[in-house]
Image (cartoon, grey):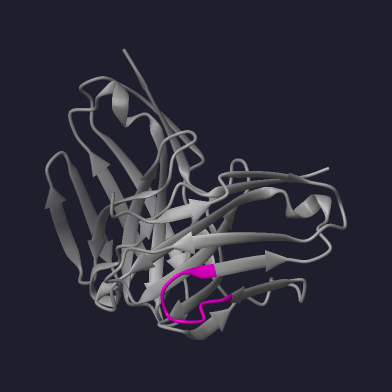
Amino acid sequence: DTGVSQDPRHKITKRGQNVTFRCDPISEHNRLYWYRQTLGQGPEFLTYFQNEAQLEKSRLLSDRFSAERPKGSFSTLEIQRTEQGDSAMYLCASSPRTSVNTGELFFGEGSRLTVL
Amino acid sequence: GQSLEQPSEVTAVEGAIVQINCTYQTSGFYGLSWYQQHDGGAPTFLSYNALDGLEETGRFSSFLSRSDSYGYLLLQELQMKDSASYFCAPGGGGKLIFGQGTELSVKP
């Protein structure tokens, strides 16, 4: 399978703990995106990378959130001092640079976070 | 600022045609994408319009009017498996912004 993979698929944690999610994009894709989705809502943009450079970060993202893509391949999204409001599905997507002309992102199945 | 409007719910019967409208206001607009998402699944790409007019892909077509900041997704010959959420997503500057989505229910 050469799709976008995310790990873990489910994470339950207690408020105040740190969590980290990993995303492995499609290998030829140089762009990688993180979105967050809550029930009944569309995916909300968090941040995206082109290769290892983080090009944009949503103003909605607090300082507790940090994302990295150190070698331009896989990416990690860390949430520090989790709050109940962080409970959501965290979606990763990747695309080739030409996605600007096609509008197509390839999404993973997501990592579901539940904060108790 | 940025805004997106889609109907929250649409119901139709098998074999019918349904149109899902989308109006948007975003900065740096490049084009309008449409995505489908089944319950518990990942969003999947359906269609993209960069220029005004109609794009057809099988049973699905998408339309864009840049001057009106308006687009729609047209689904023909509806099937039960088309029951899902549909999102319009204007793109610009490398990222897509998703609306709240339209939940389509297809009835027998």
Q: Residue at x 52, y 55 (%)?
A: A91
Q: As drawn, is B97 to the left or to the right of B32?
A: right
Q: Quadrant of residue B31?
A: bottom left
Q: Residue at x 45, y 42 (%)?
A: B102
Q: Quadrant of the C terminus of chain B?
A: top left
Q: As drawn, is B80 to the left or to the right of A42?
A: left
Residue A21 in picture, x, y percent from top left: 60, 59
Residue B52 vertical placement versus B39 (above, below): below
Residue extent of the magenta highlight:
A68-75
Towards the viewer: A22 or A93: A22
- State the residue lying farthest toward the top: B108
Instruction: Give the number of marks.
Output: 0
Residue A14 in picture, x, y percent from top left: 84, 48
Query: Could you tell me what secondary structure mostly forms the magenta stretch?
Result: loop
Residue A29 vertical placement versus A13 (above, below): below
Residue B78 in picture, x, y percent from top left: 24, 27
Q: Residue at x 29, y 76 (%)?
A: A100
Q: Residue at x 18, y 28 (%)?
A: B77
Residue A34 vertical placement versus B74 (above, below): below
Towards the viewer: B54 or A73: A73
Q: As drawn, is B88 to the left or to the right of B77?
A: right
Residue B52 inside the magenta-drawn segment: no
Q: Quadrant of residue A112?
A: top right
Residue B96 in picture, x, y percent from top left: 43, 68
- State the residue lying farthest toward the right: A16
Q: Quadrant of the N terminus of chain B?
A: bottom right
